[in-house]
Image (cartoon, rainbow, N blue to C red):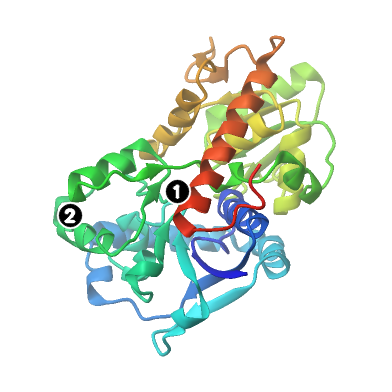
């Protein structure tokens, strides 16, 4: 059994972060690997702290972490029971314990979040053991003063895979290498894996936001009233509407998405899980973090015939034809193809036996 070390945001109080880590773990275990998540315990190098913009981003993240304090326990409980962990502290060459290391997905290569920290490029491992899976830069363009550093970091990989075509373009322009575009790890397990994990929920109108949006809240609240259903408000930023906000564990959040009459969101992962669970959805792109909207529409574009259609309510989109006969069959077929392509990449690049391949 091959030993896999994973570098990602696996223990953040964010549903997308913990569930993409869980999805990658489940896929690798299905393919016959033992999975351990690696924490960074090294002191950041000066270059990792030099960006004024990054300091502002980190300050915002620290403020966000304070706001997220009530969320920590259900996420910590989930991570404790779901993940095995190890630590990279710079004092030991622990790469001998692992057959390979994977970094991805999420925004692991976003310089505004992780800085110029070579940990996120697996510098502690020999190049022949470095791989990425669906890694994301989180930006359409890299800052000019970082290009040379990124070029050096990317040169240390045996195989490169990114989540978005924009990341593929960045790597091509920097290195001339054609990185593979692979699906988000939540798409790697079969749907039954998520169904087994989730906690059943009552039928509600679910509002889930990665960026607080009062207009999106008003739309969801009005829809809930019209349908005669409760409104469940969840957020990975804070509980913006205190009287209605709920702190959900990752398992409860999955159940809420699966059993919702409709999901209102600006979240990529809420969109993906709504498609997995055949849940009606309304999308309002983010206005503050606009650079994250691309992955929403990139995913929709990748679904082929499935389109996002703007509603009469300003700024709100619905997935077109989701109520028509045959829609979910087409969706399932495309999602299954994503799954196969992601597993195929892992099998071929990591030289795994393939017994768990669908």
Give 135 or 243, whichever is nearer the viewer: 135
Q: Position of residue 206 (x, y in %)?
A: 70, 33
Q: Distance from label 2 to label 1 (Cα)?
A: 20 Å
Mark 1 surroundings: few (<14), some (14-19) or many (≥20) residues within 10 A: many
Q: Secondary structure at mark 1?
A: loop
Mark 2 or mark 1: whose residue is earlier in sequence? 1
Q: Residue at x 58, y 14 (%)?
A: 320
Residue 163: quarter of image: top left
> Residue 117: image x %, image y %?
32, 69
**Would you place residue 230 above or below residue 119 in this image?**
above
Residue 226 at what x, y percent from top left?
75, 16
Helix, strand, or loop for circle 2? helix
Q: Is residue 331 above or below residue 247?
A: above
Mark 2 touching mark 1, by CB under 8 A? no
Residue 213 visible to the viewer? yes
Along the viewing direction, whichever of 321 and 5 lies nearer the viewer:
5
Which residue position holds label 2? 147
Q: Nearer the viewer, residue 114 or 312?
A: 114
Query: What residue is drawn where x is 71% and y is 61%?
Result: 74
- 89 or 45, which lies in front? 89
Q: Is residue 205 above or below residue 54?
A: above
Task: Indicate left or right for 44 with 353 as reference.
Answer: left
Quadrant location, the C terminus: top right
Q: Which residue is mark 1?
A: 134
């Amino acid at each position: 059994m091959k030993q896999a070390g994973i570098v990602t945001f696996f223990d953040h109080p964010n549903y997308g972060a913990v569930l993409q880590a869980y999805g990658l773990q489940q896929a690798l275990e299905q393919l016959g690997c033992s999975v351990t998540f690696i924490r960074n315990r090294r002191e950041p190098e000066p270059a990792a702290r030099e960006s004024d913009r990054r300091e502002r981003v980190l300050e915002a993240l620290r403020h966000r972490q304070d706001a997220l304090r009530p969320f920590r326990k259900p996420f910590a409980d989930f991570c404790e029971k779901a993940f095995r962990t190890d630590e990279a502290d710079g004092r030991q060459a622990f790469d001998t314990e692992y057959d390979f290391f994977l970094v991805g997905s999420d925004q692991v290569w976003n310089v505004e979040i992780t800085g110029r920290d070579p940990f996120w490029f697996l510098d502690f491992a020999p190049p022949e053991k470095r791989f990425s899976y669906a890694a994301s830069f989180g930006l359409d363009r890299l800052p000019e003063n970082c290009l040379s550093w990124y070029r050096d970091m990317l040169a240390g990989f045996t195989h490169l895979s990114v989540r978005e075509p924009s990341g593929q373009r960045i790597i091509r322009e920097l290195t001339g290498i054609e990185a593979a575009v692979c699906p988000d790890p939540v798409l790697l397990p079969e749907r039954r894996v998520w169904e087994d994990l989730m906690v059943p929920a009552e039928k509600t109108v679910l509002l889930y936001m990665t960026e607080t949006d009062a207009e999106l809240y008003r739309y969801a609240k009005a829809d809930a009233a019209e349908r005669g259903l409760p409104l469940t408000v969840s957020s990975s930023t804070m509980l913006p509407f205190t009287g209605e906000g709920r702190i959900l564990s990752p398992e409860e959040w999955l159940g809420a998405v699966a059993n919702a009459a409709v999901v209102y969101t600006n979240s990529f992962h809420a969109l993906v899980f709504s498609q997995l669970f055949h849940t009606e959805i309304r999308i309002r792109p983010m206005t503050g973090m606009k650079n994250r909207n691309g992955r929403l529409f990139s995913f929709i574009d990748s679904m082929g015939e499935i389109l996002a259609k703007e509603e009469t309510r300003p700024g709100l989109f619905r997935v077109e034809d989701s109520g028509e006969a045959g829609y979910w069959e087409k969706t399932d077929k495309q999602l299954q193809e994503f799954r196969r392509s992601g597993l195929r990449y892992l099998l071929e690049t990591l030289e795994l036996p393939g017994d768990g391949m669908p």
